[in-house]
Amino acid sequence: MRCRSLILLSIFLFAASLRARAETDSEVEARKTALDLAGAFTNDGFKMRDGHWCGAIKPHELALIAVNLYAGNQYWFSVGAIDPAKKIAVNLYDEAGKQVVTENYNSGEKAAAGFSPTNSGQYFVSIDLVEGRESSFCLVYSYK
């Protein structure tokens, strides 16, 4: 029992340290790129969701982020990356792992996917570095 408690405490502390880490300069730059793209959707009445996800991505190694979406809302998921990334893609999957049809925007190191779910639930956003070398990325999303 004591060993189990220590393991759970270790996992909690590790998870807390991940959340508490400071963003790197390259992640901040990737966030600026993502926010620049997402700003275009605010002109159409979309509101920025609090929070963002940043990290490093390698070519053809997907980064997956779980999100809870609500039927009746519209969403745009905007991703920005920095050099040496040349082309990034964003896709959306339902809780069963089936890719859903989205409206897409791709422009090199910027990409976005628009989606209006018919069912509320958990979905997964995937980010793929299609061209270029390992880079920092950031995901933000908007809703209305």
Image (spheres, helix red, strand yellow):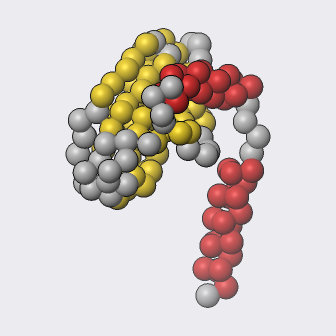
Q: In this view, does 41 lie above or below 17?
A: above
Residue 6 horizontal/vertical position (percent): 68, 75
Question: Toward which corner of the image does residue 70 lie, by quadrant?
Answer: bottom left
Q: Which of 59 and 7 is in front in this view?
A: 59
Number of numbered markers? 0
Residue 57 horizontal/vertical position (percent): 52, 29
Tell me what residue is drawn at x 63 percent, y 65 percent: 11
Residue 141 horizontal/vertical position (percent): 50, 38
Question: Toward which corner of the image does residue 135 lie, by quadrant?
Answer: top right
Residue 128 horizontal/vertical position (percent): 41, 28
67 on left or right of 115:
right
Q: Nearer the viewer, residue 78 or 12?
A: 78
Q: Is residue 31 above or below residue 14?
A: above
Tell me what residue is drawn at x 37 percent, y 20 percent: 105
Q: Which of 99 and 10 is in front in this view?
A: 99
Q: Quadrant of the C terminus?
A: top left
Tell me, yes or no, if residue 119 can be seen here. yes
